[in-house]
Amino acid sequence: MIPVIVVSIYLVIIAVIGSVAFRKTQSNTEDFFLANRTVGSMVFFLSLFATNMTAFAILGSSGQAYRQGIGIYGLMASSSGLVIPLTIFFIGTRLWALGKKFGHQTQVAFFRDRWECSSIGTLIFTLSVVMLVPYMIISIMGGGRVLNDISGGRVVYPLGCAIVALVVTANVFFGGMRGTVWVNIFQTVLFLLFGAVAVGVISHDLPGGFGEYIQKIANNPKTHYLLTRERMPERYFWSYSLIPLSSIMFPHMAIMCFAARKVTAFKRTVVLYPLAIMAIWLPCIFLGVLGTALEPGLRNPDGILLHLLTDHAPVWLAGILGAGIISAVMGSDTHQVLAISTMFTKDVFAHYGGKEKYGEKGSVFFARGFIIAVTLLAYWVALRTPESIFELAVRFAFSGFAAMAPVMIAALFWKRSTKYGALASTLWVAAWLILTWYVQRASDGMAPKPGQPAVVVFSSLGHFFERSTANVTVYGFLPVVPMVLGSGLMMILFSLLTPPPGRATIERYFPSRAVAGSSQPAVSAAAAAASSR
Amino acid sequence: MKATKVLFLTLLIALVYFLHQDFWNWKQAEPFVFGFLPIGLAYHAGYSVAAAILMAVLVKLAWPGHLENTESQAADKESKNDGGHG
């Protein structure tokens, strides 16, 4: 019962913070969606980090480590700790500047203006929404499941989903970006502290310390592989390092970049980001592996941390764990709901004349109505669809957004890129998503058991498509590899074959130094290098 | 920025990226760092610290300082301040 009380207190605190933010919120879209671009340095870091963390970082990571061992850290955490800060450094800062300079509030608004295209922007918008919505739905599902687990079944799954959806909706509806960001401060601090506290408490309860149990795992031939990567193919491991390219392409991450008060806010964020990832993932991965010795034979390894804390920690810590996990769920979910609302309001409603007709207040009214509608719909879908479908969709979404990164890079750094290059890349990504979805479903029946080698899917194609336990691979690489490389190639090829945007547009985005005068270039990489010091 | 500095930073990023694929630790569980951390996990924990150091170097040597002076040119800027509360 204590965990439920702790989580309830946490939810009340979230509601209070949201209501305070509501009193500060103004009736214009820039304030509602971006907190008037006034998010300060430390808050920006905490909020951007919360935007990208989900329950997977705590529960899923430890569960995966229980199944596959320590390799999960290198696979998902340390690669993200390098690639995500790099994308924030090179792409996020430029997005911020363009948002500030031209008033863009979404990626699509930037693409439309940069390449003088409306309908291709709408296509990118559609693909982004299709890839983002499952992520939002699975967050609600995850929250419902966590509340159900930590309450020992007292909070039934539909009620758990409803509580998460309600708190998220209220927070975004009333507070907009400001409410979301303020709540994120509290949430991020909570789940950053969780890992260290959990490790310390569990260690204290083990008389022989961790070393004795790790040695036991190493000495057992059945579990020794958990301390190595001998069952993790090197191609698979490398492929995964491209997945974090998706981070900056997720609309909620890109929109967050627009919200910073100054570009200097990014400095602290990019340096602290790898350390923050380590603070969460390292204890969770380690405890997940340790759990194979302390709690062997679990049917649902995602619950390993709950088991460890129940057996080796005081009951209040399980409550804090619950609050930490719910924080991770809601931190990203609020940003996803806000991002979808922002995109519909700016990229559809405003773009197709709604803003001119109904004004700024009408736009905010539309956004709030949309938030309620989309969350109700997500809740309804969450109760009627198997979670496995959305888990798969989210995995595909990561590859899809990663493969859209070349589009963003070209828009920011390559003058000669064209809307037809962007169109070709987008269609390439969409085609691969459909293809891999089909191959994945077609090969479900032949998927090998964990630890067994991958099998050929279509014998006529040789090793082109192979099926491992969970994934389809292309010559042993994850589909993200041909998706990213092909997307980049499409952008280059079709841009060179088609006429560039008008000179005025190029001059706006890549002003020549003579013309630029006091108005500094917004994005030019060469100019950036020249004037950085 | 000088070409040599650009080259140095490019190579540095490429080196750190390459070091992520630590094939030499692939099948090693031991030694256990601090007596309990398998070498593969300890290596990647260290890698996270190296990534933070790399980012600090980039902030120091390649920060896009020109962006700090970005001025708004948004046409509808004035309209954003017309709202009241709620």
Image (cartoon, coloured by chain):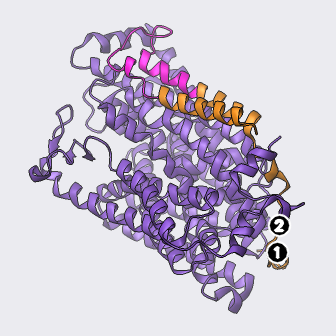
The hue of chain A in the figure is purple
Whether residue A64 sits left or right of residue A147 in the image: it is left
The hue of chain B in the figure is orange
Q: Amino acid at mark 2?
A: Ser
Q: Amino acid at mark 1?
A: Lys
Chain at tag 1 = B
Q: Nearer the viewer, residue A413 or A122?
A: A413
Question: Who's the residue at 76% across and 76% down the image?
Answer: A27
Q: Secondary structure at mark 1?
A: helix
Chain at tag 2 = B
Q: Quadrant of the C terminus of chain A?
A: top right
User: Are labels 2 and 1 assigned to the same chain?
Assistant: yes
Which residue is labeled 2 in the image? B72
x, y percent for residue B56: 70, 32
Circles 2, 1 touching at the beta carbon (< 8 Å): yes
Which residue is labeled 1 in the image? B77
Q: CA distance from mark 2 to mark 1?
A: 8 Å
| Residue A50 in view, yes or no | yes
Q: Residue furthest left?
A: A459
Q: Nearer the viewer, residue A525 or A64?
A: A525
Q: Nearer the viewer, residue A382 or A316?
A: A382
Whether the magenta-drawn stretch holds residue A300 is answered as no
Q: Secondary structure at mark 2?
A: loop
Whether the magenta-drawn stretch holds residue B29 is answered as yes
